[in-house]
Image: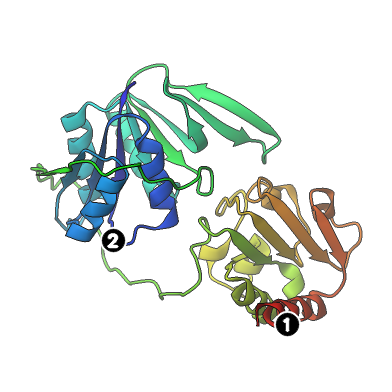
Amino acid sequence: MPSALVFFTELSAAPSKGQRELLTLVSGFENPAVAVANQVSDEAQQVLASYGVVKLFTASGDAPVFGQHEISVLDAAVQATAAKLVLLANDNFSRELGARLAVRRNGAIITDVIGISGDLVATKDELAGSYSVQARATNGTLFATLKPNSIEDAPAASSTALAVEELALENSNDAKVRIAAAEAKVASDRPALTEARVVVAGGRGVNGDFGPVEVLADALGAAVGASRAATDAGWISHDAQIGQTGATVAPQLYISAGISGAIQQKAGMQTSKFIIAINKDVDAPVFEIADLGIVGDLAKVLPQAAEEIRRRKA
């Protein structure tokens, strides 16, 4: 069984759902290790031990170069562990780090994986979920990003002894891009879009008003998503975009409201377990992949659904 490493930019005492899934996956490999580009609290270390992690690498720092500190930590941890598998989150930043380091170390990167076997064969969906394929790196370390909601979160039966090591990093001032300014995102009580078990998404049909979408999402404890048409119109932040040029989601329940279902949008949500589509147009392409279709005005359907959900919860 090859050795494996998970990389996080940061890790709190309460890891996110996606982070716990990565820890579950790495625990099935030899000498599971974690590298974090920041300091890790005692509480977070206990969480790592509960997943069978045996080694933790940390390194504090704040470089003025975009991504420089994170890639330095990851590179140092890969060299320290000689890991054959490196697991990362499936966000754009982590995919970029993995790709850059795969090139640097003559390895390979596979994104959007939903599982990896003991002999490092990665399984992933392709062509908007139409096919399931298996891929293997032909040389070097395999860097892989795990699609959230792909595996069940499962801590180990018993905790292990966790060794902690502070990495010594080399300083580099050879930078072509530097951080000019940084602004924290507005915090939200809703779950992260890519990790949510339920997603309610709105499109051009909301006509600028995401109120009904957000009301239903809050009633379900869901994340809010959107089509590119809605984000380009400025009705909602681009962080909510789902599709070929946005986020890829695979929730247990996906509710599409006022979205036609063009192939670019399908590419980001077609692997959802159950899809409900709401659209005025009976011929909308989204109905072809929906498990349940409702032909109607979302401004009327969504508030009624939210009211009934709240009534049943009460």
Q: Is residue 41 left or right of residue 288?
A: left
Residue 282 at x, y = what percent? 91, 61
**Which quadrant, please, contains the N terminus?**
top left
CB under 8 Å between discs 2 and 1:
no
Point 54% across, 60% down: residue = 196
Secondary structure found at label 2: loop
**Which quadrant, please, contains the C terminus?**
bottom right
Point 42% across, 19% down: residue = 119
Residue 289 at x, y = what percent? 79, 48
Label 2 or label 1, whichever comes before in sequence order: 2
Q: How is the image coloured?
A: rainbow
Secondary structure found at label 1: helix
Residue 92 at x, y = what percent? 43, 50
CA gap, disc 2 and disc 1: 35 Å
Q: Which residue is mark 1?
A: 307
As shown in the figure, which amino acid type bears the numbered disc 1?
Answer: Glu
Residue 117 at x, y = what percent? 46, 26
**Of all residues shown, which one is farthest toward the top?**
138
**Of all residues shown, which one is farthest toward the front?**
157
As shown in the figure, which amino acid type bears the numbered disc 2?
Answer: Ser
Q: Which residue is mark 2?
A: 12
Q: Is residue 282 left or right of residue 128?
A: right
Q: Is residue 119 visible?
A: yes
Residue 183, label in figure: none
Point 33% across, 72% down: residue = 183
Q: Is residue 201 above or below residue 305?
A: above
